[in-house]
């Protein structure tokens, strides 16, 4: 399993963790962060720990603070690099079927350029309808009007991850955007 169990309210063991705290001796033993990665090195370390039989412990009571990118350009670059990191992980013999979904989304969109029939567009139409309803639900919960432009950002995010993934598969460690 390669999906983070981040919404579990009880302490539990996970396959991956964000903002992890690691035993220094174990990290020295299995190797430090893989320097081929500009982003995603924490995921690679988690996967390597799993391969070696170590368990990662998650406790929801631990508080971590994250400061998001402050510009749209940095968001775009970071998102592309997230996809590229997953492509590089595949090249390094790690596998998660879910990492391929954004790439399939991009390939599907390219397919639409050549085979444009109404039936071919139904999945994309469904995607935007679901995105719209999710955004409306977020708006109803938060009362923030900017949540109504989320369908655009979902689409952009999924495409950047997909293109980054494909590029990471092709270019390896040379795929990251600085």
Image (cartoon, rainbow, N blue to C red):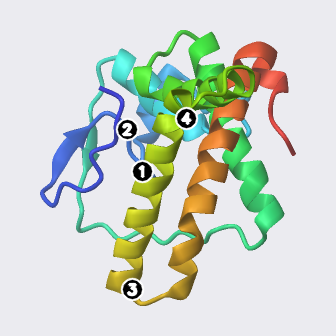
C-alpha separation, residue under disc 4 versus residue under disc 1: 45 Å
C-alpha separation, residue under disc 2 versus residue under disc 1: 12 Å
Estimate how packed mark 2 is, as few (under 14), some (14 to 19) or many (20 or more) residues with alpha carbons within 10 Å.
many
Q: Position of residue 47 (x, y in %)?
A: 43, 26
Given contact means CB atoms under 8 Å apart, are the residues at marks 4 and 2 in contact?
no
Badge nearest the viewer, 3 or 4: 4
Q: Position of residue 149 (x, y in %)?
A: 59, 71
Considering depth in this image, is 20 or 37 the residue closer to the camera?
37
Q: Sequence order check: which comes first, mark 3 or mark 4?
A: 4
Given contact means CB atoms under 8 Å apart, are the residues at marks 3 and 2 in contact?
no
C-alpha separation, residue under disc 3 versus residue under disc 4: 31 Å
Q: Position of residue 141 (x, y in %)?
A: 32, 83
User: Which residue bears the numbered disc 1?
Assistant: 21
Determine the residue positioned at 48% across, 72% down. 65
C-alpha separation, residue under disc 3 versus residue under disc 2: 29 Å
Residue 143 visible in the shown view? yes
Q: Sequence order check: which comes first, mark 3 or mark 1?
A: 1
**With respect to residue 49, does 126 lie above or below?**
below
Q: Which element is circle 4 on?
A: helix
Determine the residue positioned at 71% across, 50% down. 78
**With respect to residue 135, does 54 lie above or below?**
above
User: Which residue bears the numbered disc 4?
Assistant: 121
Question: Is residue 167 left or right of 141 when viewed as pictured?
Answer: right
Q: Which mark is residue 145?
A: none
Question: Is residue 25 left or right of 156 when viewed as pictured?
Answer: left
Q: Which element is circle 2 on?
A: loop
């Amino acid at each position: 399993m390669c999906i983070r169990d981040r919404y579990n309210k009880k302490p539990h063991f996970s396959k991956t963790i964000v903002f992890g705290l690691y035993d220094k001796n174990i990290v020295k033993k299995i190797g430090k962060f893989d320097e081929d990665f500009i982003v995603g090195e924490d995921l690679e370390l988690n996967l390597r720990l799993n391969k070696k039989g170590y368990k990662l412990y998650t406790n929801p009571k631990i508080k971590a603070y994250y400061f998001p990118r402050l510009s749209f350009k940095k968001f775009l670059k970071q998102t592309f690099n997230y996809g590229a990191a997953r492509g590089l992980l595949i090249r390094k013999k790690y596998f998660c079927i879910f990492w391929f979904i954004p790439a399939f989304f991009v390939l599907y969109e390219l397919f639409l350029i050549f085979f444009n029939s109404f039936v071919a567009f139904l999945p994309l139409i469904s995607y935007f309808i679901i995105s719209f309803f999710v955004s409306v639900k977020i708006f109803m919960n938060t009362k923030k009007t900017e949540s109504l432009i989320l369908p655009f950002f979902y689409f952009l995010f999924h495409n950047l991850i997909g293109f980054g993934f494909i590029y990471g598969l092709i270019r390896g460690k040379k795929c990251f955007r600085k």
